[in-house]
Amino acid sequence: MFQDEARFGRISDGAKCWALSGIRPLVGAQIVRQYTYAYAALSPIDGVMDSFILPDMYTDTLSIFLAKIAERHKKEFIVMVLDGAGRGLRFFEGAHSRQ
């Protein structure tokens, strides 16, 4: 299976607005950063895809994702290919240091 993650969210910045010439409007600005992360794993052999929406992209979250994949595919031997971006490499570095 191949695994990847993506961040979806919004950043609001109300710094500019349209107004009539000679009028300077007051515009309140509040910068909001809200994100959610989509994790997915795809099997190119049979086309099975598992996806989860999770709140962040930390090693604990990747552990939850991998545990859920293992739970869903108990009878299968899975080789998970990670792209090395994000937290994937730190997950495996941490696994080695815990031994």
Image (spheres, rainbow, N blue to C red):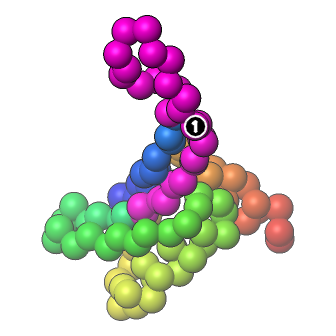
User: Residue 37: where, in percent of width, then height?
Assistant: 47, 59
Label 1 neighbour load within 10 Å: few <14, some 14-19, many 20+: few
Can residue 79 be seen here? The reply is no
Extreme-front residue of the structure: 22
- Is residue 34 located in the magenta-colored stretch of the structure? yes
Residue 20 vertical placement versus 91 (above, below): above
Q: Nearer the viewer, residue 57 or 94?
A: 57
User: Residue 72: where, in percent of width, then height?
Assistant: 38, 87
Image side of residue 41 versus residue 56, left or right: left
Residue 87 vertical placement versus 16 (above, below): below
Image side of residue 87 versus residue 71, left or right: right
Q: Secondary structure at mark 1?
A: loop
Extreme-left residue of the structure: 46
Image side of residue 57 versus residue 72, left or right: right
Q: Nearer the viewer, residue 38 or 24?
A: 24
Q: Nearer the viewer, residue 90 or 19?
A: 19
In percent of the image, x 73 and y 65: which residue is there? 95
User: Residue 28: where, in percent of width, then height?
Assistant: 58, 37
Q: Which residue is mark 1?
A: 28
Q: Quadrant of residue 31?
A: top right
| Magenta span dominant secondary structure | loop
Q: Which residues are magenta?
A: 14-39
In percent of the image, x 59 and y 58: which residue is there? 57
Residue 77 vertical placement versus 47 (above, below): below
